[in-house]
Amino acid sequence: MNYDVIIIGAGPGGIYSAYELIHKAPDLKIAVFEAGHRLEQRHCPIDGDKIKSCVNCKSCSIMNGFGGAGAFSDGKYNITNDFGGTLYEYIGRKKATSLMEYVDAINMSHGGEGTKLYSTAGSAFKKICMQNHLKLLDASVRHLGTDVNYIVLKNLYQELESYADFYFDTPVEKLEALDGGYRVSYRDREHNLCTQESRFCIVSVGRSGSKWMQQVCNSLNIPTKSNRVDIGVRVELPAVIFSDLTDQLYESKIVYRTKKFEDNVRTFCMNPNGIVVSENTNGIVTVNGHSFEDPARKTENTNFALLVSKHFSEPFKDSNGYGEAIASLSNMLGGGVILQRFGDLERGRRSTKARIEEGLVRPTLNATPGDLSLVLPKRILDGIIEMIYALDKIAPGTANDDTLLYGVEVKFYNMEVVLNEHLETEYPGLYVIGDGSGVTHSLSHASASGVFVADEIADSVKI
Ligand SMILES: Cc1cc2nc3c(=O)[nH]c(=O)nc-3n(C[C@H](O)[C@H](O)[C@H](O)COP(=O)(O)OP(=O)(O)OC[C@H]3O[C@@H](n4cnc5c(N)ncnc54)[C@H](O)[C@@H]3O)c2cc1C
């Protein structure tokens, strides 16, 4: 076998597996296959000027490449078991927390030093939220910011490249189980089919690799389960409205239980003084958000998502297909993301360019003014409206007419791969980690899962 360990995917899961392996088992020969570009070659062509919307690049620089989907993210590492994944169900709460703290320490020693760690512990907002039928979830959050996150990734790559072979722009096409190992097939630059083999294989393909992951599970008969998708909008409002919360907590995860349908609506990915961005997942344009640590790049707005979780029961199995169908409705009507003022939504009318321009909140994403009630199912829309009014009680001004809503934001969940407590499939030495496993949904959990399996491999080769 040419390698001891092959890692598929160079997102946080893959990067931290490689990092831990080169430190804990430096004799192992490691290869990392990545469908996307090197970090410095990752550029989304949308410049807001000549190219205003997604042009469906062969490899999406926002989702693929060194750093994975997290490379241009806001770099919020939430240290908590309350959200971001269910890693603790496999490895225990204490272990999961200590691995997230370990990842934080590595980030600090690779360019993240000086960034702020916020915490909900002892916050007065917990009580205020409770008094208004809202629940503030417990977490510590390290905010690296998009710019520092990039520096950390650059430093990690510099350290890794001399110890591991990186194959960029090289999607693995096929993964096969051999007697005592694994074989990956891929194309070289001349498009010839090539293979590499290894004793251990760590699959960390993230959300963008979900369809490929499903194919692998089908071909190897690895059981999976899937039944969840989160659908909603991204809210943008003047930063000052949320400043009491964001100054103290930076990111607050707040859950509201709707009176009408008893659905849970939650805030997600809060970006104080940030920007709203569009994102392309498998050809479907949805919305997301960023913010920068650099004061020069801060805006006057804060954005966050409001999401409603949809869990489906038998016989329906394609929860991601449901989310995609809703997102493609907004793409059909708006050519991408749709933008609506809250006041227009409440009055049952579409937003127009003129109404947006007359409003007091300047949109940070160039989206098509329209009507979200033509896109989102009533149950989801009603939940979002109810929560906006609930948030208005703790952050007055949230329910202002000029508050902007971008749709749709969809949080796709990968199907869950059936794994044991070592994050290993029923094939010995084949590990599935990060968002591609369905176990994690965040930078911190994905990174921690990478460290965990690397330690498992390092321990097993020591014996
Ligand atoms: C815009 C944006 C902002 C975000 N902000 C935050 C945030 O602030 N905090 C947070 O906790 N989370 C955030 N997230 C989510 C976070 O980025 C993910 O949870 C995290 O990146 C998951 O890590 P991963 O390694 O499992 O997968 P990914 O980061 O998705 O990496 C998987 C990698 O595998 C590669 N790949 C896929 N298929 C193959 C194949 N067949 N062969 C080879 N390579 C393959 C992909 O190209 C990709 O680079 C954000 C996501 C986005 C898109």
Image (cartoon, rainbow, N blue to C red):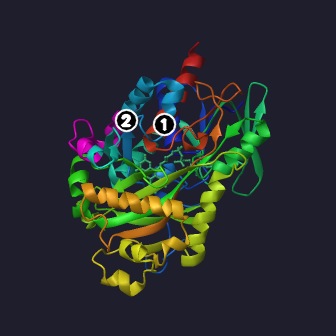
Mark 2 element type: helix
Task: Find disc 1 in the rendering and name its residue.
Answer: 16
Taking 150 as reference, is 371 left or right? Answer: right
Q: Residue furthest bottom?
A: 354
Residue 167 horizontal/vertical position (percent): 61, 47
Nearer-N-terminus badge (1/2): 1
Residue lying at 64% horizontally and 49% vertically, measured from the top left: 210
Q: Residue furthest top?
A: 463
Residue 219 horizontal/vertical position (percent): 79, 41
The region drawn magenta spans 103-129
Task: Find disc 2 in the rendering and name its residue.
Answer: 106
Residue lying at 71% horizontally and 27% vertically, measured from the top left: 426
Amino acid under label 1? Tyr
Q: Is residue 380 above or below residue 359?
A: above
Q: Quadrant of the N terminus?
A: top right
Check if mark 1's residue and mark 2's residue have beta carbons within 8 Å: yes
Can you tell which quarter of the image residue 121 is in? top left
Residue 294 horizontal/vertical position (percent): 27, 58
